[in-house]
Image (spheres, helix red, strand yellow):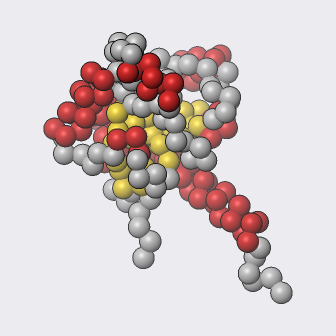
Amino acid sequence: MSRPKKILFICASPEEVTTLRAIADALPEMRAVFSPAYGGRKVELLRSLGLLERTPFGYAAGRAVLSKIGDLGLPCEPRGLLGDFAMVVQGLGRISGDNLAGRALVLVEHRGATALPPPRSLADRIQVCAASPSSVARLVQLGWSRSNIELTGAIDAPAEAAYHAASAIARVVQRVLGAASRTESRAHLEETGDSTEA
């Protein structure tokens, strides 16, 4: 029996831990792990110089996120260090992570998340969950492809609406993960050849 797929939830703030946890709760068949925001060598250098303390990549923000993860009793895997996660879910805004190559991403809009233009290197692998029709229009204006935007509702809305949004986002995650798995299987067949062929 294969192990459940692991999803890395990267959190830029303690509030985002709570927001993204609702999505993890709607995906009981998956393994969810949580991490503070992180980046590559350039980010680490700037952080060591104290230049990122007013951003999600600063030491203070990282400690606050780790504290919230611990308070909620959530599985913690800083920086996705084990490297065996199948995909990433994080808030809409500056994309965190320097080990995302080949992995699908789902970005979630919520209060406090600032939409940015899509990164060229990752744009085709990102699905954005938008809170409202006006958000969809704004994302398209920023350069996101409409086919990569899903209107799911606001994850930080009042209780019932937030529950429906979390469920809608969970369905997006399942669909994206399924599509990524099929792509991976096709690539594997192309590399090894179909053993059923004569």
Residue that appears at 61% across and 47% down: 102
Relative height, residue 153 to residue 172 (above, below): above
Look at the image and tell me whether residue 158 can be seen: no
Between 198 and 45, the one nearer to me in the picture: 45
* Image location (x, y in percent) of residue 144: 65, 26
Residue that appears at 35% across and 50% down: 32
Relative height, residue 28 to residue 11 (above, below): below
Q: Could you tell whether 41 is left or right of 157 in the image?
A: right
Q: Could you tell whether 31 is left or right of 87 in the image?
A: left
Residue that appears at 52% across and 42% down: 99
Q: In the displayed orientation, state which residue is furthest to the bottom.
A: 198
Specify the quadrant that holds the N terminus. Answer: bottom left
Between 101 and 90, the one nearer to me in the picture: 101
Q: Could you tell whether 84 is left or right of 73 in the image?
A: right
The answer to which quarter of the image holds residue 140 is top right
Specify the quadrant that holds the C terminus. Answer: bottom right
Relative height, residue 78 to residue 182 (above, below): above
Q: Could you tell whether 175 is left or right of 19 in the image?
A: right
* Image location (x, y in percent) of residue 62: 30, 28
* Image location (x, y in percent) of residue 195: 74, 81
Q: In the displayed orientation, state which residue is furthest to the left.
A: 71
Residue that appears at 30% across and 34% down: 17
Look at the image and tell me whether residue 30 can be seen: yes
* Image location (x, y in percent) of residue 51: 40, 13
